[in-house]
């Protein structure tokens, strides 16, 4: 699983935007998540969803990128959510207390319909 | 092709004609003598039999003083002569030809001329070697180019040394020059920079508080380089000031959170993870309150060898959010116990190619150390890091505190 290449894809809908990240989210790849979040037009009432199902590793740069995305969403009056957080990441996120700042859902559909 | 030439106008032919006939008048003899390179023919013992004017010009010598009197090696510098006798000549005899070898010619006035030498052995119809033909090219331009390359490389190396010295100096300002002596406690620390060129973002400190208590912390700022160093500096001094004025480590982390969040909110958020503790002598041991802000849990190794992680669940990143929460745990260190604080450069290192190390693996690897002491634990982890080599991608800071055993009675 560690060998999957890094990718970031964005799809948008009425309810918001879903950014799907795959591979290792680290100092080399985190800027691509930041760029994807920057490129999304957010507005009040919409939701920015980051799908982490395919993420095999996330270091402090990755976490910074998630916090940056959250700050962008907050400025625009939009919400933010993480979905499908893999177990190892969930453990890291629990350690640093991210759960309080990022509502977490099993799937993007769950997040968008909530 | 000829037809195409015929179709070119008369004017074209008039222009090309004189130049071409001048080329035809250029005799083989003239070409030999005044070629843009040196020619030399020597007997098998090296005696010069024939030499062209170009080469004589470079040497500043007359034909009479060279032909039949000097050997090829006599035209070289002392070092070149030795190289010629030990390498060039034997190899040439073996291979029959040898090309592109750099020598220095010594001219009559003592000046040296860098040249590239190519030689071929001429054999007769019976296959016996008869003489050696040598072509010599002026390599002054090439030598200048090589010296320029060398100079540029030396300059780049000096620049790299300068950057590394700067990074090292800056790093040292972020760490205590030496850990203080704490009565009844053994302390040891280690800083492992992942890169010599960049300042890392890990920090630690150990310092006295009022009433015989001591404060300590170890943390990790997100990111690397100059901006991380600025935040590291701010974090270290803010936390130290807060620790001195507030007896509650949780309150000190809250103050640090406010200071950092003021500075680093927005589209380029930065934060740190910190473990911050207070320590007070209690009988033979020490009572410790350990507050955590999103940092990997400290490892407690008991005198008997049992170990566990001291997690303080709920502690959040420091500086990322306006209202972060921090939590603390209390622990009593007894004689023979060791407390290890570390940054995730250790636990996220690639231990074996791609596989990342882990907290569980660290606990297992340190299980054999009994009795563990601050210096022995730091020594063991330092060895682990050395074993990971390039797998340590991030800076790693280590700080260990232990209570010495009295005369080994609890060992």
Image: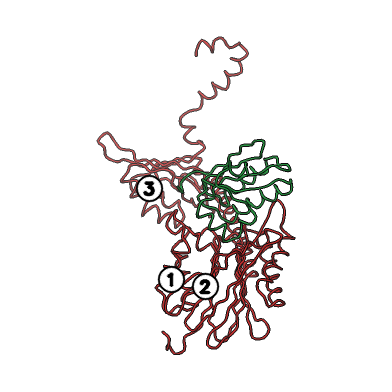
Pointer 2 and pointer 3 on the same chain = yes
Q: Is residue B251 above or below residue A1?
A: below
Q: Is residue B232 left or right of residue B196?
A: right
- Circle 2 residue: B340
- B139 or B245, which lies in front? B245
Mark 3 belongs to which subunit?
Answer: B
Query: Residue B325 at x, y = what percent?
Result: 66, 64
Residue with the most extreme left position? B126
Q: Which chain is green?
A: A
Mark 1, secondary structure of its residue: helix
**Res. B210 image quadrant:** bottom right
Image point (43%, 64%), residue name: B387
Give the number of marks. Answer: 3
- Circle 3 residue: B47
Q: Nearer the viewer, mark 2 or mark 3?
A: 2
Query: Residue B190 at x, y = what percent?
Result: 54, 71
Residue B286, label in figure: none
- Circle 1 residue: B366
Q: Are marks 2 and 1 in contact (CB under 8 Å)?
A: yes
Q: Nearer the viewer, mark 1 or mark 3?
A: 1
Mark 2 Cα shell of 10 Å, populated few (<14), some (14-19), many (≥20)? many
Pointer 2 and pointer 1 on the same chain = yes
> How far apart are the two marked residues, 2 and 1, measured between alpha carbons?
11 Å
- A113 or B398, which lies in front? A113
| Colour that chain B carries in the picture | red
């Amino acid at each position: 699983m560690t060998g999957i290449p890094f990718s970031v894809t964005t799809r948008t809908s009425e309810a918001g935007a879903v950014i799907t990240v795959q591979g290792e989210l680290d100092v080399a790849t985190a800027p691509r998540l930041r760029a994807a979040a920057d490129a999304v037009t957010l507005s009040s009432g919409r939701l920015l969803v980051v799908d982490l199902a395919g993420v095999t590793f996330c270091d402090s740069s990755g976490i910074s990128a998630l916090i940056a995305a959250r700050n962008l969403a907050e400025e625009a009056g939009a919400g933010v959510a993480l979905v499908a957080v893999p177990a190892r990441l969930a453990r890291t996120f629990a350690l640093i207390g991210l759960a309080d700042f990022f509502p977490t859902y099993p799937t993007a559909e769950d997040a968008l319909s909530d | 092709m000829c037809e195409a030439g015929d179709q070119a106008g008369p004017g074209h032919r008039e222009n090309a004609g004189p130049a071409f006939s001048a080329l035809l008048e250029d005799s083989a003899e003239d070409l030999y003598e005044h070629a843009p390179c040196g020619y030399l023919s020597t007997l098998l013992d090296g005696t010069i039999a024939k030499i062209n004017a170009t080469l004589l010009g470079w040497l500043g010598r007359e034909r009479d003083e060279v032909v039949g009197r000097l050997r090829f090696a006599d035209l070289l510098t002392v070092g070149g002569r030795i190289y010629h006798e030990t390498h060039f000549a034997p190899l040439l005899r073996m291979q029959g030809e040898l090309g592109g070898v750099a020598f220095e010619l010594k001219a009559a006035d003592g000046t040296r001329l860098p040249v590239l030498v190519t030689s071929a052995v001429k054999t007769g119809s019976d296959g016996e070697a008869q003489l050696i033909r040598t072509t010599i090219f002026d390599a002054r331009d090439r030598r200048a180019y090589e010296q320029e390359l060398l100079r540029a490389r030396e300059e780049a190396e000096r620049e790299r040394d300068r950057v590394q010295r700067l990074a090292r100096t800056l790093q040292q300002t972020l760490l205590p020059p030496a850990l203080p002596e704490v009565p009844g406690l053994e302390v040891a620390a280690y800083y492992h920079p992942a890169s010599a060129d960049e300042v890392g973002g890990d920090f630690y400190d150990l310092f006295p508080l009022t009433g015989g208590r001591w404060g300590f912390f170890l943390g990790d700022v997100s990111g690397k380089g100059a901006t991380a160093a600025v935040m590291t500096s701010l974090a270290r001094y803010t936390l130290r000031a807060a620790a001195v004025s507030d007896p509650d480590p949780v309150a000190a982390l809250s103050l640090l959170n406010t200071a950092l969040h003021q500075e680093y909110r927005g589209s380029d958020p930065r934060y740190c993870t910190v473990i911050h503790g207070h320590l007070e002598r209690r009988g033979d041991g020490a009572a410790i309150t350990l507050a955590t802000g999103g940092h990997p849990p400290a490892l407690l190794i008991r005198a008997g060898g049992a170990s566990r992680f001291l997690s303080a669940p709920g502690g959040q990143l420091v500086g990322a959010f306006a209202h972060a929460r921090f939590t603390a745990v209390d622990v009593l260190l007894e004689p023979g116990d060791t407390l290890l604080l570390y940054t995730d450069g250790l636990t996220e290192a690639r231990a074996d190619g791609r596989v990342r190390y882990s907290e569980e693996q660290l606990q297992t690897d340190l299980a054999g150390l009994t009795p563990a002491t601050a210096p022995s634990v730091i020594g063991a982890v330092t060895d682990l890091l050395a074993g990971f080599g390039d797998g340590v991608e991030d800076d790693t800071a280590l700080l260990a505190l232990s209570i010495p055993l009295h005369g080994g009675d609890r060992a």
